[in-house]
Image (cartoon, rainbow, N blue to C red):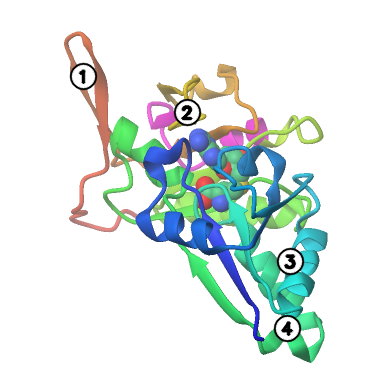
């Protein structure tokens, strides 16, 4: 019997964000692996085994799921947002690359989901309407020096930047440093969006400027989008402003 592994994106929030493909993949799994808080969002039947693990145990979780699939089971691993964005799909590939031959014989399917950056952008308007990039501020797996280099390159090249993993208990200062670094290239008035727990009951979205952004609280459930010199606000009476980045740029500013 040949086993398989599906790496399933749950989207950013509740089950309104679950795609039909993800729903089907969840239903057809015999066992589901994942971070406990993500697994809690998934209805699990009595005949499905549930293997919850801690957020930081991605490598061990991937290995356990691959071993289970190698025994012939249809296994699912859940991931918040999209599994390919700073998440389980890359972790599983890393384990397959370094692991036993039998893991390469497994069917592996990655089921996409709505990543946090898109959900936050949609709440604010169209900040990603022109070229953009995503950077994780976690320096667990890369040196901070590299993050700084990428922030400089992104802002000086005119990319809107989505900052994933802006803050954690172990990483309290990185967001402040990143905003200061972006401020070397961008005007004080550059729009900045803080989206927290988007798609869940406790969702909050706030639009501010690069000068004010260091005073705004953020945590592990927050995604920060920093605009460019082109990104604009449309103020509206009794409504939140619309933030957008126009699609056209007429000339290159040196
Ligand atoms: N695979 C996930 C990202 C994992 S990294 C995805 O595609 O969205 C975890 C980071 O994603 C968090 O620190 C936060 O920056 C962001 N994030 C995840 N869910 C979010 C949500 N509902 N609202 C805002 N940001 C979120």
Q: Are marks 3 and 1 in contact (CB under 8 Å)?
A: no
Image position of 241 (left or right of 158): left
Of callouts 3 and 2, the N-terminal one: 3
Provide residue 119's location: percent of width, then percent of height: 39, 40
Q: Considering the numbered disc 1 on the image, is that residue within a helix, a strand or a loop?
A: strand
| Residue on which disc 2 sits | 200
Can residue 182 be found in the magenta stretch? Answer: yes
The spot of residue 178 in percent (x, y) is 62, 39
Badge 4 vs badge 3, beta-carbon distance below 8 Å = no
Residue 192: tell me if it is visible.
Answer: yes
Whether residue 219 sits left or right of residue 225 in the image: it is: right
Residue 222: image location, x then y, percent: 56, 32
Say which label, 3 or 1, has the lower sequence index: 3
First reached walking from the N terminus: tag 4 or tag 3: 3
Label 2 neighbourhood size at 10 Å, few (<14), some (14-19), many (20+)? few
Q: Residue 103, which numbered label? A: 4
Q: CA distance from mark 1 to mark 2?
A: 26 Å
Q: Earlier in the sequence, mark 4 or mark 1?
A: 4
Residue that numbered label 3 is attached to: 65
Is 237 or 91 nearer to us in this picture?
Answer: 91
Q: Secondary structure at mark 3?
A: helix
Which of the marked residues, 1 or 2, is nearer the chain's N terminus?
2
Is residue 105 placed above or below 59 in the rendered structure? below
Q: Quadrant of the C terminus?
A: bottom left
Of circles 3 and 1, the one toward us is 3
Q: Nearer the viewer, mark 1 or mark 2?
A: 2
Relative side of 213 to 118, left or right: right
Magenta segment boundaries in residue numbering = 175-194
Measured Cα–Cα span from mark 4 to mark 3: 10 Å
Q: Is residue 228 above or below residue 104?
A: above
| Res. 235 mark | 1
């Amino acid at each position: 019997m040949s086993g398989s592994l599906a790496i399933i994106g749950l989207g950013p929030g509740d089950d309104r964000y679950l795609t039909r493909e993800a729903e089907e993949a969840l239903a057809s799994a015999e066992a589901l692996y994942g971070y406990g808080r993500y697994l809690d969002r998934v209805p699990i039947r009595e005949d499905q085994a549930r293997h919850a693990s801690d957020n930081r145990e991605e490598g061990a979780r991937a290995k356990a799921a691959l071993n289970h699939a190698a025994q012939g089971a249809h296994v699912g691993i859940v991931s918040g947002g999209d599994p390919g964005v700073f998440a389980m799909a890359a972790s599983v590939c890393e384990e397959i690359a370094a692991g036993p031959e039998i893991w390469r014989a497994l069917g592996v399917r990655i089921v996409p989901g709505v990543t946090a950056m898109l959900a936050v952008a949609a709440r604010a308007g169209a900040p990603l309407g022109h070229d953009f990039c995503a950077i994780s501020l976690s320096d667990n797996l890369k040196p901070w020096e590299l993050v700084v280099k990428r922030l400089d390159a992104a802002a000086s090249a005119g990319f809107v930047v989505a900052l994933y993993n802006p803050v954690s208990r172990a990483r309290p200062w990185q967001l402040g440093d990143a905003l200061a670094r972006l401020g070397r290239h961008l005007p004080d008035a550059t729009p900045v969006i803080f989206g927290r727990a988007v798609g869940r009951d406790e969702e909050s979205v706030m639009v501010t400027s690069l000068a004010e952004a260091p005073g705004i609280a953020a945590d592990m459930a927050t995604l920060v989008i920093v605009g460019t010199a082109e990104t604009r606000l449309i103020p509206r009476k009794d409504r939140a402003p619309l933030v957008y980045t126009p699609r056209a740029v007429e000339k290159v500013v040196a």
